[in-house]
Image (spheres, helix red, strand yellow):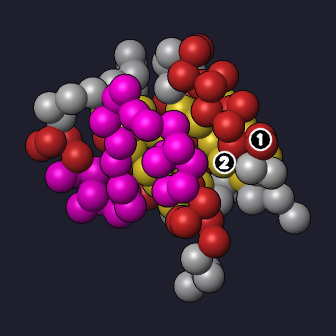
């Protein structure tokens, strides 16, 4: 069965770009433009991996990550950040984020990271 990836970013263009790349890799892709939508999708779909933008109006990436952990979501998380948000990254890593990419990111590097994290055996 196809692995599920959720893209959480308030920028439509980034969501579309990532969705296109990840669909080509054979993943089932979901999109959310904000925290509440993201958490709802996680509840319903239990994605294997979440690409989570740090700066989202309303509920930011850290808050979304905090809520995911409270819900007991087991999804792997890769953060996407603007340049210079290192203190936030540190906090996200402490909450179990696996990696982070600084925008503008290299789409191939991101694709490889997603593939690498989703090919690891569970456990």
Instruction: Find disc 2 in the rendering and name its residue.
Output: 5
- Image quadrant for the N terminus? bottom right
16 relative position to 67: left or right: right
Figure quadrant of residue 48: bottom right
**Image point 80% across, 51% down: which residue?**
26
Mark in front: 2 vs 1: 1
* Pointer 1 local density, CA inside 10 Å: few below 14, some 14–19, many at least 20: few
Indicate the position of residue 89 as horizontal and vertical percent values.
23, 46
Magenta stretch contains residue 105:
yes
Q: Which residue sits furthest right?
A: 1
Position of residue 47 relative to residue 41, above or below, is below
Q: Can you tell which mark lies on residue 7?
A: none
Magenta stretch contains residue 111:
yes
Q: Can you tell which mark lies on residue 23?
A: 1
Indicate the position of residue 110 as horizontal and vertical percent values.
49, 46
**Image point 39% across, 22% down: which residue?**
56
Q: Is residue 60 visible?
A: no
Badge 2 element: strand
Indicate the position of residue 32 as horizontal and vertical percent values.
61, 28
Position of residue 28 relative to residue 53, above or below, is below
Span of residues in magenta: 90-113
Position of residue 25 relative to residue 94, above or below, is above
Give yes or no for contact between labels 2 and 1 (Cβ–Cβ under 8 Å).
Answer: no
Looking at the picture, tell me which residue is in the foreground, 80 or 31.
80
* Pointer 2 local density, CA inside 10 Å: few below 14, some 14–19, many at least 20: many
- Image quadrant for the C terminus? bottom right
Looking at the picture, tell me which residue is in the foreground, 37 or 24.
24
Question: Disc 2 versus disc 1: distance between alpha carbons?
Answer: 10 Å
Looking at the picture, tell me which residue is in the foreground, 29 or 103.
103
Label 2 vs 1, first from the N-terminus: 2
Figure quadrant of residue 99: bottom left
Position of residue 11 relative to residue 89, above or below, is above
């Amino acid at each position: 069965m196809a692995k599920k990836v959720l893209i959480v970013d308030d920028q439509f263009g980034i969501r579309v770009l990532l969705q296109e790349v990840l669909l080509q890799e054979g993943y089932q892709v979901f999109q959310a433009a904000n925290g509440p939508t993201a958490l709802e999708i996680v509840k319903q779909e239990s994605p294997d991996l979440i690409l989570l933008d740090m700066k989202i109006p309303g509920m930011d990436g850290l808050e979304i990550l905090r809520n995911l952990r409270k819900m007991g979501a087991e999804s792997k998380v890769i953060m996407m950040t603007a340049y210079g948000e290192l203190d936030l990254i540190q906090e996200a890593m402490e909450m179990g984020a696996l990696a982070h990419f600084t925008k503008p990111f290299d789409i191939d590097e991101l694709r490889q990271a997603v593939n690498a994290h989703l090919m690891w055996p569970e456990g």
